[in-house]
Image (cartoon, rainbow, N blue to C red):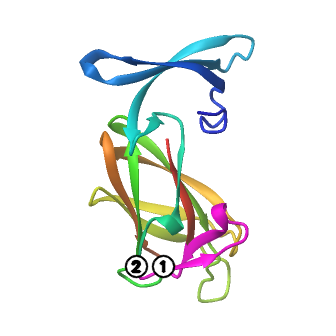
Amino acid sequence: MTTESFAGAIGGPGGQDVVTGPGGKDRILFHGYGADRSRRVLYVADLGFADGRPVVRGSKVLHEAELARVHRATVRDARKASGGRAVGYIDHPDSFVEFRVFAASSGPHTLTVRYGNGSLDASGAPAAATHTLAVNGAAAGAVDYPYTGWDEWKSREVPVDLRAGWNTVRLSKGEHHTELDAVEVA
């Protein structure tokens, strides 16, 4: 847990302790600075364990696209991408990148997609692009990507409903072309 993993909403998280809460669910108690940076306060968050590693609800976990399940697309070197690689050529109707993500508890979460979109429309002008989104095999809408240019990485946030434990998040070919660097789940 870091200030960055909480997107700055909690500063300097630390001093944690794990307890068993109502219903036998693990919780983590920790202190940090909230909006009022003059004092530290106590926070409580749902806690789960993914392959033996702790996952705290609200603290972002990064999942690299090149380590996800890639179907009819290409992992390529991308100097400015997180980890130096990205997935491109998600160009076919059956192309997809599927992430295995863990949620400490069920309910609404935020999926942040780091992308690069260099698509051009028929006239050669910059164009927005999309991927279709599926969560645990069910359609969950689309992710819209404004134009960035190739190898210029930006982020889009979309709400997703996850179940407690392991989930699959699939981004598939949509309109035009977008490359994927990573996703974060919070």
Residue extent of the magenta highlight: 71-89
Q: Quadrant of the N terminus?
A: top right
Circles 2, 1 touching at the beta carbon (< 8 Å): yes
On residue 77, the disc is none
x and y, in percent, of residue 83 in the image: 64, 62
The answer, for residue 45, to whether it is visible in the render is yes
Label 2: which residue? 95
Q: Is 169 drawn above or below residue 55 in the view shown?
A: below
For label 2, the SS is: loop
x and y, in percent, of residue 104 in the image: 38, 36
Label 1: which residue? 90
Q: Is 28 drawn above or below residue 48 in the view shown?
A: above
Say few, some or many: other residues with alpha carbon within 10 Å of mark 1 (under 14 / 14 to 19 / 20 or more).
many
103 relative to 158 in the view: left or right: left
Q: Does 81 appear in magenta?
A: yes
Question: What is the distance, in whole Å, between disc 2 and disc 1 at their CAs?
Answer: 5 Å
Q: Residue at x 64, y 20 (%)?
A: 34
Q: Quarter of the image holding residue 122?
A: bottom right
The residue under label 1 is which amino acid type? Answer: Ile
Q: Residue at x 73, y 17 (%)?
A: 37
Say which label, 2 or 1, has the lower sequence index: 1
x and y, in percent, of residue 82 in the image: 65, 61
